[in-house]
Amino acid sequence: MPPGNEYAADQLKTQGNTHFKNGEYEAAETCYSQAIQKNSKNPLLFTNRANARLKLEKWQEVIDDCIRSIELLKENMKAFFYLAQAQIAINHPNEALSSALMAYELCTRSAQQTSNAATISALVLKCKKAKWDIRERDRIRRRHDLLADLEVKLEDAYKKEIFEIDEKVAKGDMGTVESQEEKSEIKQDWEKKVGDLRTAFALSDPEHLQKREVPDYLVDGITFEIMHDPVVTKNGRSYERATIIEHLKRSPTDPLTREPLTITELRPNIALKEACTEFMEANSGWVYDW
Amino acid sequence: MFASKRLSKELTKLHDHLPPGVELVKADDFTEWLMDIRVIDTNPLYQGEVYRLKFSFSPSYPIEAPEVVFVKDTTHPIPWHPHIYSNGIICLDLLDTSGWSPVHNVESVCVSLQSMLTSNTKKERPPGDEDFVRYNTQRPRDINFVFHDNQV
């Protein structure tokens, strides 16, 4: 790199940041691109451009920028965070989820970046929901296909019986009055079978049977929402990591006992986390909107 | 950022169950609620009266304390209490930034205020009430109360 290029790149980056703050995302993108031409070894230039491109909804280019930034710097929370947002936008929830989880892990590992935990954990949840939505749509379609197939079979059987009666009447083996009675009986029978079949399908749908309640021990006492990454305090109470950190930054005390409590004293509650995950998986769907 | 979700859950619970002497008056949005409280014992200072509380929530509720004041109208007086100014501003550590905890909620604040009234025997205003009411332009959350008295 010719001398002075690094400096020039930094100048362009600062200009880009100003444009970004003013909401001029295209101008910001241009500045970052020029900066990258001067210095293609700075991972921050790529994440900054990715952020501008996120605003411009240039999803594929966001993904490219993030990947290049991660190549330059592995433990790159921002890059994974932007990457996840772009991946979810182009409807790749599986990839988005693993990127978001990576961002969350990097975030919790570093002491100074904890303020992003809440935002990232919301993104993780969004990815999980998107993933579940796709699976659910599939399941409903398959159910509908099966139900439709079975309904067609019942209808075929019904039509066949009617046809057989018409044949008997044509041959003179059955009287008209008798055939009418028989036909209406067959019709009733068929309608009842279709009704029973639909009821059976409706009953077998878990959505109809489950109680939509989250047990208190899985609920964060601060946000009243189900926990995803519970941490335990000295007195044995558990809270969602992102929210208790938010509280401790303002007031380093235990929310219940008011005893001094610092962020470094929090410990992950692994068993509770597993219980939360299990509950989420068993009840996904409504639980995302709860 | 948490406020609306958390408040909507609190609202569901309040519709389900309210402690005795506490009523939900108005909760049309997640910025301001009105609650009515009355004492449920026989304290003669407060018999037959109903007090109206105004809760104002910031988007950071419950990390940040709600602002809670008594409001006065024709049917709702400001209760007598050595920690309640005649303009409705309440001096209670629980509502102060340093005394607030995010595990508190609208219901627990109402119940705390109820018991603050119940245990009071003095028909008094805080010292300097007149001046405070006349000159104070600060919002309750910005006032630095000194909590010297833990008896009341």
Image (cartoon, coloured by chain):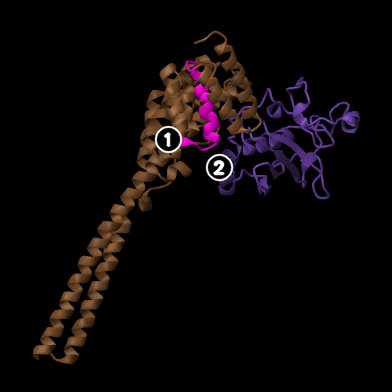
Q: Is residue A46 magenta?
A: yes
Q: Is residue A130 magenta?
A: no
Q: Quadrant of residue A92?
A: top left
Q: Quadrant of residue A64?
A: top left
Tell me the SS state at disc 1: helix
What residue is pinned by disc 2? Answer: B9
Q: Colour of chain B?
A: purple
The percent position of residue B115, horizontal first and vertical second, equals 69, 34
Q: Quadrant of residue A170?
A: bottom left
Residue A86 versus residue A289 in the image, above or below: above
**Closer to the camera, A98 or A57?**
A57
Q: Is residue A164 visible?
A: yes
Residue appearing at x 22%, y 80% in the figure: A185
What residue is pinned by disc 1? Answer: A87
Q: Which chain is brown?
A: A
The percent position of residue A229, horizontal first and vertical second, equals 45, 27
- Residue range (magenta): A40-60
Q: Could you tell me how far apart the alpha carbons at marks 1 and 2 are, in whole angstroms?
A: 31 Å
Residue appearing at x 13%, y 88% in the figure: A169
The percent position of residue B106, horizontal first and vertical second, equals 64, 38
